[in-house]
Image (spheres, grey):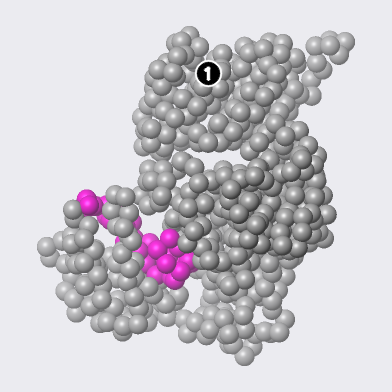
Amino acid sequence: MELLDIRRLTGANVIWERPGAVLDLRCSTRERAALAARWQALARTLLDAVGWSARTTRVHQLHSGVALALSAPLDALYAATEMQEYLWEQLSTPNPERFEAAVARIQRSIAEESQPDLLALQKAAKAAGLDFLSDDEEVSVGTGRGAQSWPVARLPAVADVAWRARQNIPIGLVTGTNGKTTTVRLLSRIAQAAGRRPGVCSTDWIGVDGEILERGDYAGPGGARSVLRHPAVDLAILETARGGLLRRGLGTPRADAALITNIAEDHLGDFGSETIDELLAIKWVVHRALGAHGCLVLNAEDSRLVAKARDWSGHLIWFGRDPAHEVLRQHHKTGGRIVTIRDAQLICAGPEGEQDICAVADIPITVGGLAQHNVANALAAAALAWALNLPGPAIADGLRSLAAADNPGRCNLVAVRDFQVLVDFAHNPQGMEAILDMARALPARRRLLAFSQAGDRTDVLIRDMARVAWASGLDRVLVAELAAYYRGRQPGEVYGLLRDELIAQGARAEQIAHYEWETESLEAALQWAGAGDLIIMLALGQRQDILRRLDELARLPGPDSGQR
């Protein structure tokens, strides 16, 4: 038995829809049942003793252990973590703190942390049908242009809030393994085309109405709250990544629609997301924000989502590239809504009829339909936009307006001298396969792949990357070291796994090279490339440096320009 973490759950999460505190323990299958039973008995006794008899517990079984959760009031989550610390002490040490002393200490913490004004605001907001957001620094009711916020230390009385001036804005959530950020960017363009002022958060930035406010990874609850409190926003599109969902839960208690793009093997190996089924459960959390009228948007080509949806009784929109796909056909036949491709046109079809949106070839990021993964992203964006009641003409305008340059690091094809460089962020086997499928469709004399992989992937997943890579028909492979992404691995360890698998798949040793930095790989690739060649650059750690370098090269006169 090993303690991994004790943390707060601030929003709906993979365990349940309520706040509380969780104790993550790694243990054997044989230990699990007795451990969970003992913890539940101890937790029940402690909850009753501190005056929390109405609070509940839950045991969430995981691949390599168990997550033990107890619910708590929103204004006592740190006290709840103290309770978990005491319970861990009871489970793990022969001489734990005396029960009476622990109860008295925890009761003092509850009293010190207590904020009756916060709970009163939460209750009043719920009664008024308004979104309520709370964190360590700020509390707000309503969202976007209808929000009002206060510092936690200076909360108003319920009677002093201008309740009639508060309102909620439409909210769309975007999660999945691949395609989230591109889909968010498409949705932002669609919303703008509809005359809205969208706020977005993603792994790249926070933006409002097309203006970037903060750069960085904001695909967690903090990024969501920043968007939802911005006074200019009248529609929110929130990328919702695995890490935030797993650690804290959803950043919003409500959404009008939620999209799951796909489920693929990525970020497996962390406690709580060690298997594909655990990853699916984490992504599926977004459904907890959907009320009776909310809509879930799913990928009909993902068999795991199809199977999981059998337990979903709410509103659904399915999307997929083949209108004859059984899931799409049956859903449409029974009066459901679908988004698909027919006769090279993106269409929305439902009980009210069928609407042509635009030609796939007119969507720049699909590269004339060659980038099939971006065709899927366009379908996903159109489906979520439809779920958010954005009109068809705006969907078409938004899809047509996002150029490759507006989606940096994702399927960017750059002409350099007399060859081409394809840059993408793909970092798992499914994403790599998608970009290599496109690369195969591009005419090229020779093909070189430069890539790398983070150390927090399993050996199997790292080897899968090499297998998928070599199967695409390459002439040379360059692997960068990614020291900033070792994540517990030794220098050269990831490269060793990739090299061994490449050779096992048929590569010759002289076709593989190893570099310290991705920028070094790029320079080596540029020296190698000749007329008609294609470099496929999968940039993870130095994406901005690589894009800047390629932009410089693209501005230089070509070999046939007549300039010297």
Give residue 109's quadrant in the image.
bottom left
Residue 143 image point, x, y percent: 66, 70
Tell me if residue 480 can be seen.
no
Does residue 181 sit above or below 163 in this rendering? above
Does residue 68 sit above or below 174 in this rendering? below
Residue marked by disc 1: 477
Residue nearest the observer in this picture, 23 or 331: 331
Instruction: Name the amino acid, label 1.
Output: Val
**370 displayed left or right of 69:** right
Give residue 460's quadrant in the image.
top left
| The residue stretch that appears in magenta | 1-29
Residue farthest right in this picture: 562
Give residue 493's quadrant in the image.
top left
Q: Who's the residue at 72% across and 26% down the image?
A: 414
**510 displayed left or right of 317:** left
Element assignment for label 1: strand
Q: Who's the residue at 66% across and 19% down the image?
A: 534
Residue 278 image point, x, y percent: 40, 51
